[in-house]
Structure formats: structure tokens, C-alpha cells
Amino acid sequence: MNWIKNIVKFWKTIQIVLIYLVSILLVYFMFPREGKFKYEYSKNKPWMHETLVAPFDFPVYKSDQQVQRERDSLLQNAKLYFVYDSVVGNQMISGFTSEYNNLVSSLGIGAYVSDAWALTGHVISGILDEIYSTGIMERHPVLEGKELDQLSVMVVRNTLAQEKRYGSFYTGRSAYEHLIAELERVNPGSMAMLNRMNLNEYLRPNLLYNEEMTSKVRQASLEELTLTQGMVQAGQRIIAVGELISGSDFLIIESLRKEYESNPNVGKNYLVVYVGQLLLIILIFLALYWFIYYFKKDILISSKQTLFTLGLMVVIVGLTRAASTNDAVSVYVIPFVVLPIFLKTFFDIRYALFVHVITLLLAGFWVPNSYQFVLMNFLAGLVGVFSLRSYYKRGILFYTATFVFATYALVYILLSIMQEGDLSQINWINVLWLAGNGLLILTVYPLVFLFERIFGFLSDATLFELSDTNQPLLRKLAEKAPGTFQHSMQVANLAEEAILKVGGNSLLVRAGALYHDIGKMENPQYFIENQHEGGNPHNELDFQTSAKVIIAHAIKGVEIGKKHKLPEKIIDFIRTHHGTSTVQYFYRSFLKAYPDEEVDVKEFTYPGPKPSTKENAVLMMADSVEAASRTLRTYTPDTIHELVENIVAHQAEEEQFSEADITFSDISIIKEIFKNRLSNIYHSRIEYPV
């Protein structure tokens, strides 16, 4: 059997190694292929390195804010293009002439047309021709909100574009007013003859907005926008050690960094760069491995926990790479805080913060100022894990998201003030991205539920639900084995108070205590807390059979727990709450009854395993102490003290705590808590007169 265990252990080790190797390779292939600029610097701070001299010629790039201002100005001042349509005017004039002649015919004038009618028709056609030659401007939505009196537009006529004032053209209303005024001026009294015609129908826009042409010209203008402003020559001194990095110096250093990291022709040996990147990534992952090896060994034997941790890291690093190479998304929107929140939820704060720092160190290779990036996200991570205390409290996640956003915004604004020295220079767009970051934290709750189902983890919310005594399995225990149920409640109270003092998951130990004896539902009458006066079924059994029945409750409890789909961590309490101890009563009774017979102690020994966590160990102590305390004849501080000391000492002698992360100091504190708690439970009461 040992060789099977060795094979299983070896296979688990191979799985862990493969997960690490795949994670390292994924991060490596996402790494920026260019070399990393070796200097760290911040605006308006002293240059802390040696005197910087330009190693090659390079252009000075404009700041992002300056480029954005120029783009905004270019777009704001871009001309709108309107195309002259000669067909519209010809159609309208032709339509008027035809209808005018029909009107004349309908009046009974016949073929003879008086001079007055002929003059009126000629005048109107001439005015329409003049109006359409000048042009009637289309009232397009693109003109909304613009100062039309000051607006200049581009008019394309016969493939020739000319800049014109918007006011030099007619609108639909001004064209009609001009038509009426000219008609009355040239031929007074003619309006009386045209009461039957609506001249407004012959006024249609013939200067039409061309969105495609406008967009093409705008795009061409944006493409012509220069991103540089000047050159730095090779050998030119950029900044000396101790000098303050002013705005212009900062732009030059930033330009050098961009050229160094993006230009392959700067004397870099890329084979060395790639090997260096791989070794650096391996070292960072080794640091994580060493931390886990010394402080969280249980993760090293769990491929699911390892996959979850490294998978989160790779996803966060991948999101950072995607944001850094995509101008449409800012790196500030990436919710780095969800990583420590998840890890704190399923593991502990120390582990969560260490993995958070490791992830930030990896992600920092994609951002310009790694120190500020790490500082901002580390502080936000601290606020996130310490403000999110328990998921079962309503609204806690909303408060956490608010606190995290406030931390991000405050740190970002303070860093911006330190760099720029001017509140007006703060990029408030980045603050909005940080607000989006805070909103993404609200996705934690549904994802916690999903990860619990996929990886078999336990959150505080789930533990709180499991600890509800109205759970069907606990109600069944209370009905079938009421004494065991009461015992479990007392054990839960003892264990919870102890774990709060020595450090651990109080919700986990409470839930474990409530379920640790569910195996007694199978044969409740064989356990003393469920027996009534009048008989003990063990009197009809031999000592080995009685021991077997008692030991079976742990095995049966595991089966019941799996059948009801209890989390594995809860089942661990059922499996380990007696460890590999012996059923002392029946074992000693056998030795006393049959002193000359050889006995196989395994027949009286629980199969184990021993407790592997502090919570498991505390439950074992609480269970034994609470059960034994019911057998005391008198309850005094001395008897309680002796009981607790003897039971815990015996468990320690049997090395039941050898595999748990619990210290002698912890055990001493736990014993004192048990003594005080039991003394309070069984203290003497005043006898009231009847």
C-alpha cells in the first residue's frame, strides 16, 4: 500500500511542477520583447542615478496631454464639407415653370398669356436661379450647438473645395424671404396673382453635408499630426545626478525610454534580454514557491489551490499586458485588488498580500513608472483585504469597493500633485478609470460562488450558511441524536472561543464542530449523551464490538458528509476529530477483564488521520474536554483544571498535534480558555427558596 501512496504523492508533485512551468511560460511569452529601461524616475523629483548622456540620436516626444490637446483642437476646428448639387436647382426651377404654366392654363387664359403673367414667371425663375447659384445650406444635425455666424465651411463645387462663411449662403427660411422680397421689388402686386402657389415648395437645400468626406479629411489631418518636438543628439547631456527632473527633462527622459524599449537598433543583444527575462520570471515564481513552502505547505499538496493561485496571477498579468498595448483601455481600470480579496477569502491575509505583491512585481514591467504603480495597487490591496471582513454582512462589498476607489483616487491625486505641482494638471480621465476599477470589484461576490463550486473552496458566506442550525442535516441530527446535537453546540462554543484567541478561522471551526459527530445518527443509542436511564446497549456487546461501534461514527460521518455534499474542509473535521487515538474506556476495560490475553490495540484505535490544521487540533481538544466534563461528579476549579490538563496532555503524548500548525503557547492559551469556559458553564447557582 505504501508504494501506491508514493505513486499518488509523486503524481501530485508532477502536477504542481507542471502548473508552475506553464504559468512561467505564459508570463514569459506575454513579457515585452524589448529591453527594459534601467532607470526609475519621477517628475519633479531629483535624478538619483549617474549623469545621463544621450547614447544615440532620438526625437523628443510630446506628452500625452499635449498630443491630446492638439488632437482636440484639430477636431474642434476641423472644417465641415458640403457638396454643391446642381441637379436640385434645375429640378426645382423646372418644376416651378411647369406648375406655373399649368396654373395659367387653369385660369382660362388659354394660349394667350398677358405680359404681366409672363413677367412674373420670368422674374420668379430668375430669382430661383440666383438663389440656387448661391446655394441653400442643408440644416444638418452636425450644425447643432455651433455658432453659425462665426462658422466657416468647405464647399465643394465642380471638384473644387473652397472655404466659405456659413452666413454667405441661404438657409431655407432666408431663401424664401429673399424670394418674396425680390418679387415685390421687381414686380409689385404680383403676389396677388400667386395666391394659388406655394413658392416654398421650390426651395430645397442644394449644399448637402458630406460626412464621409469630412471624416476622411479629419483623419488625414490627425495622421499628419506630429508626435515629436525636436531632437536630442548623441553625446548630449540630458540630466546630472541630483538635478530636479523638470517638465522638459521628464519629456526627454521619457522619449529616451520609449526609443530604448521600442528601437531594436540600439546595440541590445536580444538573446541576452530574453534569457534574462526568463531567469527573472523564474526567480519571482521561486520566491512565491519558497513562501508557500515555509508558510502554506498545504497548498503545495493541492493542485487545485496551486492552479487557482497561479491562474489568477497569469490572468491579472495578461490583463495588464492587454491594457498597456491598447490605447482604448487604461491600465488603471484593471481590478488588481480582486486577487488579494479572493486569496484572503479562501486562504488568509498574509498569503493574499504576498501573492498580490508578487503579481504587482510581474505586472510592473508593462507600466512606465513601476514604483508608483506598485505603491498605488499595494495600498489599495491593503484597504481591500482589511475592509472586506466577512461576506455575509449585507453591503460589505459595496463599502469595500468605495474604500478601494477612494484609496486609488487619493494616492493617484497625491502622486500627480507631487509630479506636476498643479491641481489643474491632474488627468481626471484616469480617476474615472479608477472609478470603473472600483465597480469591477462588485463582481467578486458571484465569482466567489463560482470558484467555490469549481475548486471546492469555502468562503465566510458558505460557512455562515452551514453554521445555521436550521440546515436539514443539523435538524436531522437534533431529531435522531438530541444529546449529540447539544454536545456539538457546546463543542462549537468552546472551539470558537479558543480559535479566536490563538488565531484561525472561527467560522470554519464552528461549522466543523457542528458537523463533527453526524455519524452518531446511525446508532445514537450507543453514545452516552443520547442514552436514557434504564439501559446501556453496550452491556450486550463485547469490548471489541463496542469499540468498533464507537469508532464507526467517524467513518460513517465521513460517508454522510459526502452524501450530503459537505465541503471537504468540513469533512476533515469529521475525519480527524479523534485522530489516531484509542477508545480508552473499552480498551482499559478489556485489559482489566482479560489481563493475560494479548490485545491488538488497532481494534480500539481510530483510523485517523491526525489533525492537520490548527482548527482541527482545537476541535479535537474541545470535543474531548466537553465530553469528559459531563462525567465529573463535582465541578470545582480544581477538578476542571485537572480534567483539562490530563486530557490535553494525553493527546499531546500520543502526538495527535504533530501534524498541525499549533504551538505549545497556543495549547496553553487554549487550556486556560477551556477551564474558564467550563467553570462558567458549571458554576454553582444560588438555591432559591421553594
Image: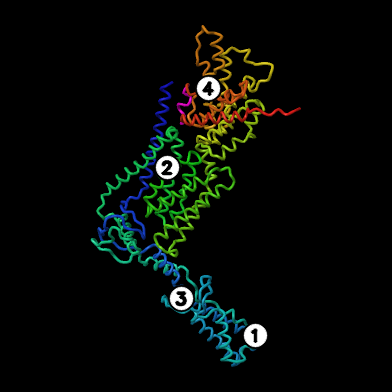
Q: Which of marks 3 and 1 is in front?
A: 3
- Distance from label 1 to label 4 (Cα)? 119 Å
Which structural element holds mark 2?
A: helix
**Disc marking residue 354:** 2
Q: What residue type is labelled 2?
A: Phe
- Distance from label 3 to label 4 (Cα)? 98 Å
Residue that protrudes farthest toward the left in the picture: 235
Relative height, residue 549 to residue 257 (above, below): above
Q: Which of marks 3 and 2 is in front?
A: 2
Viewer-proximal residue among 633 and 367: 633
Question: Which tag, 1 or 2, sits closer to the chain's start?
Answer: 1
Is 518 within the magenta? no
Residue labelled with disc 4:
646
- Distance from label 1 to label 2 (Cα)? 89 Å
Viewer-proximal residue among 80 and 25: 25
Residue labelled with disc 1:
195
| Count of numbered labels shown in the rendering | 4
Q: Which of marks 1 and 4 is in front?
A: 4
Q: Mark 1: few, some, or many residues within 10 Å (few <14, many ≥20)? A: few
> Magenta stretch?
654-661
Question: Which tag, 3 or 1, sits closer to the chain's start?
Answer: 3
